[in-house]
Image (cartoon, coloured by chain):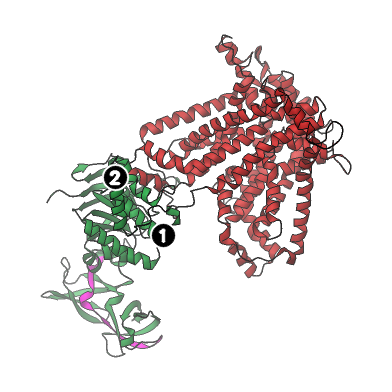
Amino acid sequence: MTGFEAGLKRPLYNRQRLTVLQEPLVLLVILLIAASLFLFVIYPLYSVLKTSLIQRDGSIGLGVYSGLLAKSYNRRPLINSIRLGAIVAVLGTIIGFIFAYCTTRVNLPFTGFFRAVAMFPMISPPFIMSLATIMLFGNNGLITKKILRGMVNLKIYGLGGLVLVETLAYFPTAYLVLSGVLQAIDPSIEDAACDLGASWWQVFRTVTLPLAIPGIASSLLLIFIESLADFGNPIILSGDYQVLAVQAYLRITGLYDLPGGAALAVILLVPSLVAFFVQKYWVSRKSYVTVTGKPSGQQISKSEPWVKTAALIVCLVLTGIILLFYGTVLVGSFMTLWGVSYDFTLANYRHVFVVGGEHIKDTLFLSTVSTPITGILAMIIAFIVVRKEFFGRQALELTSMLTFAVPGTVVGIGYILAFNQPPIMLTGTAAIIIILFVFRNMPTGIQSGIAALQQIDPSIEEASCDLGADSSTTFRNITLPLISPAFFSGLVFSFVRCVTAISAIIFVVSGKWKLITVAVLGSVENSDLAQAAAFCVVIIAMVLSAIGIINLLVYQPWKRGGQKRLKEPTISGGAESWIGTA
Amino acid sequence: MDRYSVELIDVVKVFRDRSGAKDHIVAVDGVSLKLIQGELLTLLGPSGCGKTTTLRMVGGFEMPTSGKVVLDGKVINDFPPHKRDTAMVFQSYALFPHLTVFENVAYGLRMRKMEKDAIVAKARHALSLVGLEGLEERQPGSLSGGQQQRVALARALVVEPKVLLLDEPLSNLDARLRAQMRIEIRKIQQALNITSMYVTHDQEEAMSLSDRIAVMNHGRIEQIGTPQEVYAKPVNRFVADFMGRKTTFLDGKVMGFDENLMHVSVMDAVLPFERVSGINTGDDVELVVRSETVDIVPPGCGTFPGRIIHAAYFGSQVLYEVDLLGTTITAEIPDPQEREVFTQGSEVGINLKTRSIHVLPRANNGQIT
């Protein structure tokens, strides 16, 4: 990942800077950020931990844990979650690698199309795959009933179904990480191997694959984290296969067992954090990519015809499956009653806009408010972390990235525990939702901001200061324009996550503030799949129009020949950092 | 001998243009070459002239659009790189970063399924050839640029290719190391008597290590010959201008012939030059005046009067920009310690070393600057 590689280069630019004590404004900003990170990131986690340690008699101890883990049916969700995560991580990484190899290392036609389709799962609500799976393979599913005529019982509720939907939902993570890694391999290294007598397979086995190992490890761990945190798919599709994220939720909302739910949340947090730290501090340092001399920038050589054919088939099959799932949801949203009556109707959309109108309005309002806050805060934190030297800088960076690794369920439980009583009463307000959005969606923006800033030689900023600009003028005129692609991709990402989030947000929604994803879940629970499909289509439409609007604002096509346009659109500009937990 | 080590016959390479500005780009436009066993031929030219594409077609990384690539009498147009008996030294070295120095060098032998003992012996020999004994277990990332360069060279040499291909191998090294490495490469190449094709844009490099040079421009070979031929007897204005430190063209007219000499009127003088075939009395010509063919003498002594516009002292030489009756020419004067150094604005005399000045027919200019 670019951010981490750039991080390795930092010592190059390690020069003496002004200490923040000489810049009171910067100091103030740092203190404010540190305080809010403490309040909205650390404190909720602390609340979860504290609550989980309150025993039945009110004393402090590990009683809740020992009580939970004593019973084997309580241990099962942990084992289930880890097993699911491991299977999905392996399958998702394999598919992501194959797809990345085909689109970066083989000169195929339509690679743009393949890339776009592979990105679909990243911009859609997490449970859309489950929905499509039920519509296709469920008891009343299209394929189960119409094609297989009920002869085969496809057990989609449980491990099998979850593996299918999570693999499809999370392989794009592997795809993004690995296509970045593969693209960074100088093609002349593979040319050299070929030149020395290695066939395509030998080049792949002895050069390409070994060089991609750190990226593969990274993507395994990231998908593992994502699968552990997944809430939307298992709540619909898990059946008897209980997983931690859902069990923690049910324990709190169903059994009103706060300490028990909190303890499950902590149990869920441990493997996620372990995977996160292994990824961040160990795997990402083992990159070979920067070792070679200057990249020659040559294009990839022609591939052998059979490799090309095989790659094309793989890409077509995979994009075909993704399109089938999305097509099913789109078509299903126009059907009277999926599984029973396949008549065309607009009734579902009528329902969405009449009954769900409030949900759409609230979602739009909350997302539109929190998105710019997220983007600006992320850039300020990135700037401070990269360019300023102060005590606790690394702790601040780590804390701001922490919500990246913490499963949404844990964050949600933390927020209801922390902000449900004085001194800070936020439950039921719009503020708690906006704050949750901001602090949950910020890490991606920070990461792409840091990556962008580290690629800007500080001497560019020094040149500006040298020519008479002060610190803030330099930031406005020089730094900001240079990191604006990262800023806008942060905006897009943040909005997408606001509109599609479910796991953390389900704890803090209230009668007053409703969110559209919660409405989808309600429709699924009522077994009204067509309605849920219509909601999903509306969500995707909202996401696509937001991306369109932000791209319009950035590139301003009506201003002809004005500013020089960047080649890559914003959405793909910061795509590598589009990786996080649901 | 009619069998050559490498032969290119009217090779053309057309790329589809990805930016969409044009339909296609002709990178190599009808190149024909012949290399005899043990010869080192350099493709020399400005960037974008097609020299690297030509080399990559010999290596098998690009397929020619038309024409033939012949290796040892066999047409190899459709052979992929791993089925060709060529080995390339890449501009970026392209060392395998996950393998040690030894494993890098042994890679090609392993791919040839050689016995383990033979691999060790050959790889060690190749490393000693480039002076890297003792670094076998190091990772390429921990080596200096020059050492990485040697590993790349050893890795290509160890498979004993019929042709060694070198794609600007020294362009990532600093000037001093570059000068040292080009001597080393030439010595190793001569010792092994290995047929080599070398790509560079550095004329000094090309002249100092080549048996022959092919000067390329716009996908075509402008001239092919020994370094002396290409430098001293350029066939057209492009080659004349590309070679040498600084070349000025002076217009002249042929007044008549006298045995091996031809008399050309330049400015207000008539000077004798070596006769060039195809030029007749009355023809318009131009003189290829390289900076070292101009001599600066005290005022009143030379053929022409001149005035120093700018003087730059380099220690071993002085470089003057001189105004010669309205034309600015460059003069490179060696041994400034032995002679008078003129300052800016001084009036001087100018002599042309007519034996070193080549004459081109004027019809050749125009299309290329």
Residue B136, horizontal then vertical, whole percent: 37, 53
Residue at disc 1, secondary structure: helix
Pick whichever, A113 or B285, lies toward us: A113
Which image quadrant is residue B295 in?
bottom left
Q: Which residue position holds label 2?
A: B117
- Residue displayed at 62% across by 26% down: A129
Which one of the lettered chains is coloured red? A
Say whether residue B50 is visible.
Answer: no
Say whether residue A472 is visible.
Answer: yes
First in sequence: mark 2 vs mark 1: 2
Q: Amino acid at mark 2?
A: Asp
Mark 2 to mark 1: distance in Å?
30 Å
Q: Amino acid at mark 1?
A: Gly
Residue B45, which numbered label?
A: none
Are both tags, 2 and 1, on one chain? yes
Which one of the lettered chains is coloured green? B
Q: Which residue position holds label 1?
A: B145
Pick whichever, B327 or A411, lies toward us: A411
Residue B25, horizontal then vertical, whole percent: 37, 48
Is residue B182 found left or right of A398 in the rendered image?
Answer: left
**Is A520 situated above or below A37?**
above
Does the residue at mark 2 contact the one at mark 1 (Cβ under 8 Å)?
no
| Disc 1 chain ID | B
For the magenta stretch, what is the residue range? B342-362
Which image quadrant is residue B116 in?
top left
- Residue displayed at 66% across by 70% down: A468
Residue at disc 2, secondary structure: helix
Residue A230, horizontal then vertical, whole percent: 67, 31
Q: Magenta segment: does it hold A519? A: no
Which image quadrant is residue A356 in?
top right
Pick whichever, A226 or B358, lies toward us: A226
Badge nearest the viewer, 2 or 1: 2
